[in-house]
Image: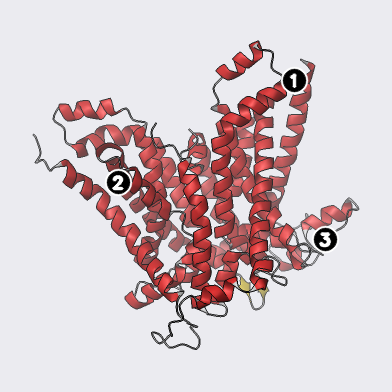
Amino acid sequence: MKTNTAIKILGYAILVLASTIILVPIVWTVISSFKAYYEDLVYSPVPILFFVPSLVNYVKLFTVPYLAQRNILNSLIISGFTTGIAIGLGTFSGYALSRLWRSKNLTFFILSIRFLPPISFVVPLYLLYTASGLLDTYPGLILAYTAFNVPFALWLIRGFIEDVPTDLDDSMILDGYSRLQTIRKIILPLAAPGIAVTALFTFIFVWNEFLIAFVLTRASTSTLAVFIVGLNTNFGFEWELLFATTVIQMVPMLLVVIFLQRYIARGLTFGAVK
Amino acid sequence: MRQFRISRRILTLLLIAPTLAVVLSVTIFPLFYAAWTSLLDWNLLYTPFGSAPFVGGANYLTILENPFFWRTNMLVTVLYSAGSTGIEFLAGLGLAILLAAAKPRGEKFFRVIFVMPILMAPIAVGYIWKYMMEPSIGLVNFFLRSLSLPAPMWNTSASTSLISVILVDAWQWTSFTFLIFLAAIYALPAEPYEAASIDGASTWSKFRFITLRLLTPIIIIVVLIRLMDTMKFIDVIYAMTTGGPAQTTEILAYYIFKQTFQTFWISVGAAGSFILLLIVNIFANVFIRYLPWER
């Protein structure tokens, strides 16, 4: 009994310490995002805790033309469409590779695309996009991100479809329903939580991605990640905007993740943990 | 009511073909193009498009015969990937075991905290830590000074830059290993433990011979994901050090980035890409072997 209490106290202590290490930079980011004056951010060797909080950085990001408005919208459009298309393709192909043609080679071949380092082909992609006029366009970005995310989406969704007992859809097919009706009436409802978490992962990956967006976008489709890099100007780094942008970028994801917590480990491990 | 039927084979094709079309159009062509580029002598600044001379394996030799490449880029890659992954593995596993053993109240609360870093854009994480690690006004050194500890120069000095980027990567991704190990520990079967208790096994030997053994596949998967990701992504390094000072944080992926986007010597960048691709591919092959195929 005694050792149990000791373990409990030790456990608490270490967890609280670890949580503090995680939280300090995040809390500091949130606090700093309310600092209106550059002086509050970069001119004191002692961290400034007392200042007049202001929403001016957020207001700037959303209202000043050519600041982040465009990037926020671009990130939403690109992440949203990529997620929709990747999930659609992943669901149909995942169904086919689970129920119609269980080809291990093809599945792993498609999955292996996910492991290619993006740095290895952003340049040829850049040349290809310049030649075909896809550079700095929504379709171009969405196509590139979809190609990178379908393999992962397909693999995860296929795993979730594998969890649906085959007897269910077999009996529907015996009753004369078509394959597509089976997908709609049995597979989709039962695999829905898994598909939702796959969508979340796809969205977050695109939302936070930097290199592909950095190379394939210019002024009209640049994303939030590219905006952050752009804060590093010749006149110094615009720290106050960095913190507000980071908060804008993170909070919506956090809200969704809290609802889908149960499935996160599975998504993170390519389905290796249930 | 019965709709028209198409054969199973055609349906399969219809369901898989669009995915293959998208994936192949964006990856396979560029990959072949990059392979071809790596055999030319092509600098975007000096060589007009289409007139780059064919030089065969010269770019690969330029890279691989350069002792400096091995001493800096390859060494830094190994230290960075192994260092980050090592910390993330040990800390993540330790924390997960602790949380599973202590089962504290408010476990959900801890989980929400631990999921936060992985939701942040790595590029933003890099800049935030650059700010926090600023030697004279940063929060980190403020804490260290107030505890009368030495305040290092972090990412701005050649002797601590690599440690700095490793620590930042570990800050962001220990959460990842922690969440996975926690889920895996909770999914462990109870029977082996009961049997071991009946046989009078100690807590340590239970951990050593049951927990660790059952977790091995997950450990391999997590370690490989982190090794591959640390080799592939340059966001934090780009934000914090741009490979410096004195190339002390220039991992192979960053070397490729630099050759491509700073010196515009894209043929050397492409050759470097294939060296990286080969290394990651070896890890990916092992990784795929540990993924569950049948359920």
Q: Position of residue B38 (x, y in %)?
A: 46, 74
Which residue is at the front of the view, B75 or B218?
B75
What kind of element bears circle 3?
Answer: loop
Q: Position of residue B197 (x, y in %)?
A: 65, 14
Q: CA distance from mark 3 to mark 2?
A: 52 Å
* Residue under pointer 3: B152
> Left or right of A112: which side holds A176?
left
The residue under the point 41% across, 74% down is B36
Q: Position of residue A169 (x, y in %)?
A: 24, 30
What kind of element bears circle 1?
Answer: helix
Above or below, comparing residue B136 to residue A115 in the picture: below
Above or below, comparing residue A50 to residue A40 in the picture: above
Can you tell which mark lies on residue A93?
Answer: 2
The residue under the point 58% across, 62% down is B234
Q: Are marks 3 and 2 on the same chain?
A: no
Q: Quadrant of residue B252?
A: bottom right
Q: CA distance from mark 3 to mark 1?
A: 39 Å
**Three-letter residue code for mark 2:** Ser
> Left or right of A12: which side holds B39?
left
